[in-house]
Amino acid sequence: MSIPLISVVLPVYNGEAHVAASVESILRQDYEHFEIIALDDGSTDGSLEILQRYRNADGRIRIVSRENLGLIATLNEGIALAKGDLIARMDADDISYPSRFSRQVALFAQQPQLAISGTGIDQLLGNRVVRGRPNPIYQTGDWDVLSMFFTIFLHSTVMYNRNVIPEDMLVYDAGYVHAEDFDLFGRIARQFPAAMIDESLVAYRIHSDSVTTRHKRQMRRTHLKLVAENLQRRSLCDDPGALHAIGIAVTRESVRRAANCILTIERKIAEQADAASSSYSHGTLCFFYFLYQLVMDEQRPELTHEFLTLTGKWQLIRRRERYGLRSATYAPWLCRFSAGATRHMDLMARYYQSVPARSIEPLQGLA
């Protein structure tokens, strides 16, 4: 059997701080039959010079550099240039562990019908790493259902199989800015098999200048747009406009409508008796937490209190959050103090759960 070529699509925009580590992690793969298509999307820092140094040292790297066109156009350009049967996504601030490609290629070899695969992640915060854990939600394997509610894979862990996915489908839609991966994964999973290697094979870097951080509000709005469309497709929500409304503004009315949307989804799922019902429940739970975090981030505890009361889901949040939010009825200032303390405790807990990056074998020399 021939060894499949992997085309690594690597968009870069002002990634000077991290792109060298990202490229190094690809060059250190124990699977060597790949090409890197590095697309410099009009960077104004030293990203292009870094890429050129690596290109001069390794002929498997190709560089495209031009004016800024945005992420979606850059991704589609990279896919159009790709020569491989398998296309791997990579972000300029993340790190692939050495066995990532070989593990994903082996999975496609075992299951040739697979269209897409992702992997688990560790979180990279500065010079420390929080190790990921297997997520039981993925055990059902009902990817078409789960993909209705959330982005089923982290983008930089994904590998696409062009032998299964039609050429006209493997295109990111410009109508879903900052949630283009959510849209594409869902379209693929609705028609073709998908799979997760539920083991950390990528270190996902968390920092203040990431796309996720800089465009959180727009990302959430587009996410809500997609969930609304998915729910309409399966007749699971009577008021899809509620999700648009809460994406625009978190108000008492939009919170009420969003809470009713959650309750309607749960009621309609309960009326179904198909084998995928557990995945519907898991997906709805993930979506509830998405909305809960959206409301929490407004730092208006009275609205979070109302959302939890209307949905009847106080028992699903942590005890210290319950205590803080229940006090909102009597002393909003005390609730805000409690919320701040909770965020501080979460940061401390994350730190103590982490380990130095140098202690993780695949990250040695890269962090």
Image (cartoon, rainbow, N blue to C red):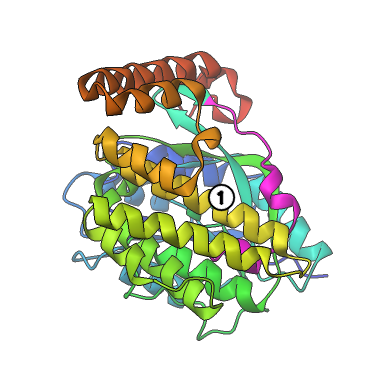
Q: 243 or 21: nearer the eye? A: 243
User: Residue at left 25%, top 50%?
Assistant: 252
- Is residue 146 rendered to the left or right of residue 242? right
Percent of width and height locating residue 54: 41, 47
Percent of width and height locating residue 141: 73, 59
Residue 132 falls within the magenta-colored stretch: yes
Above or below — where is 285 with respect to 232? above
The residue wearing badge 1 is 285
Highlighted magenta segment, given as a residue range: 130-149
User: Residue at left 54%, top 18%?
Assistant: 353
Q: In the figure, residue 248 lies in which quadrant?
A: bottom left
Q: 330 or 336: nearer the eye? A: 330
Q: 22 or 155: nearer the eye? A: 155
> How packed is label 1: few (under 14 Cα within 10 Å), some, or many (20 or more)?
some
Q: 67 or 188: nearer the eye? A: 188
User: Residue at left 24%, top 21%?
Assistant: 331
Which corner quadrant holds the N terminus? bottom right
Above or below — where is 25 with respect to 51? above
* Element at label 1: helix
Percent of width and height locating residue 266: 58, 60
Query: Three-letter amino acid code at disc 1?
Result: Leu
User: Residue at left 69%, top 67%?
Assistant: 4
